[in-house]
Image (tube, rainbow, N blue to C red):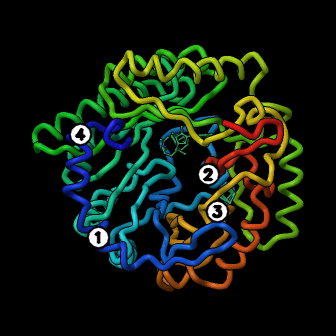
Amino acid sequence: MEEKRLGLKKTAALARRYWPTMVRMLPKLYVERFNRRVLLGFPRIITVFATERCNMRCPMCLVWQSREHFGEADETIGLASMRAVIDEAARWGTGFYFTGGEPLMNRELPQVIAHAASRRLVTGMTTNGLLLERRAGELVDAGLTFLSVSVDAREEAHDANRGLKGAYAGVLSGIARVRECMRERNSPFPVIKLNSTFLPQNLDDLDFLVELAGELRVDELTFQHFSFVDDACREAQARYAQRMPFGKLFQGMDVGERCFSPEQVEKIVAFMERAPELGRRHGVRVGFGPTTNDVRAYYEPGFPSRESFCSLPWSEASIRANGDIEMCHGHVIGNIAQGSVREAWMSEPAQAFRAYAGRHPNAPPCYRCCALKYVFPSRRKA
Ligand SMILES: C[S@@+](CC[C@H](N)C(=O)[O-])C[C@H]1O[C@@H](n2cnc3c(N)ncnc32)[C@H](O)[C@@H]1O
Ligand code: SF4
Ligand code: SF4
């Protein structure tokens, strides 16, 4: 399946570069059964918020809520603080995913990526593309494995949504420059992906985005379901925040009663049905996330059922730009300046959160989180 997705050459290059990491991590996996989930002895993936800052102002963005949570904090995480984390992670074969804010606003990011690459760890990053042309060479030299570039719509609508004329042009010139640098250095990396989010503003541009991905010859195009919170959910989240000691950083834009009209939801459903064939025609694999058994129910108000499933508290952690080690909801379990990730990961607050999350797969903060595998009560089959 991976071969089909990436092509034989890239899969072979990935295997050549990372086989020592895979072999090293096998005997180190500490596994504990926990409510059907498997607790790993160290996060399998660490998401690093390279900075909380951003050079764009997208109205749909979750980062605004983070900024509310973090204030106007200017921290950007650098090599000095990340070196020990990467060295610790190297023993476990952990992958690092860099996001933000806009990760390319972090000047030291290529050095951090290069250090991870020197330990043969997989790295990925999502960017809005604005600084990509300027920083492409550094990223390719650093050995970034996966690059995801966000694109919302055709040029005019993309720029309007991103609040910046030239944002779309930056995506195109950035990807072109990355390709050029890969050719110059004879590098198969990074694997390049376009990432889009279903928005009220782009529902007439979805086919166009598949054509664009084909023209740009990217390795994959993914669509994210819009992450949102409605009035009823926000009230439930407020009650949760008062009752539970597990953080208050909830994902999802406030949309009032609903985010899409029923007609708009039908557009999304119809697109998802024709996307595989459209993708084949344009030579690009099209993926969707998060998974759900019922797209219509996802966009309706209402909580998913308890059969929904999330393994993140048992397998992934985040590091914020101020060094906080977090589980989801902004539940801080340590700081990289004060202790190891392993200590935080196995700490009592982390275990308490897992115990709660295992019992409540449909807790208010999980409402439309991108990590949940959604099962809605209406239809149980995909
Ligand atoms: C938060 S951004 C951070 C990285 C970078 N600044 C960028 O825009 O690519 C990561 C991804 O989340 C997407 N995104 C923003 N708001 C969203 C929402 N409400 N629901 C789903 N995805 C969203 C963005 O379009 C982007 O692809
Ligand atoms: S560029 Fe990315 S982080 Fe910045 S506002 Fe837009 S979606 Fe959010
Ligand atoms: S679905 Fe819930 S438990 Fe999983 S990452 Fe999201 S908020 Fe956390």
Mark 4–mark 1 contact, CB under 8 Å? no
**Label 1: how many Cα within 10 Å (few below 14, some 14–19, many 20+):** few
Residue, x 26% and y 65% (percent of image)? 120
Which label sits in the foreground, 3 or 4? Answer: 4
Type of residue at label 1? Val
Measured in 3D between alpha carbons, the distance from the residue under mark 3 to the one under mark 4, in whole angstroms, is 35 Å
Q: Is label 2 within 8 A of ligand 3 (CB to nearest ligand atom)?
A: yes
**Label 4: how many Cα within 10 Å (few below 14, some 14–19, many 20+):** few
Q: Position of residue 310 (x, y in %)?
A: 65, 57
Return the residue at label 1: 23
As drawn, the label of residue 371 is 2
Return the residue at label 3: 328
Mark 2–mark 1 contact, CB under 8 Å? no
Q: How many marks?
A: 4
Asked if residue 206 lies left or right of residue 17, the reply is: right
Measured in 3D between alpha carbons, the distance from the residue under mark 2 to the one under mark 1, in whole angstroms, is 27 Å
Type of residue at label 4? Leu
Return the residue at label 4: 8
* Nearest to the observer: residue 321 or residue 91: 91
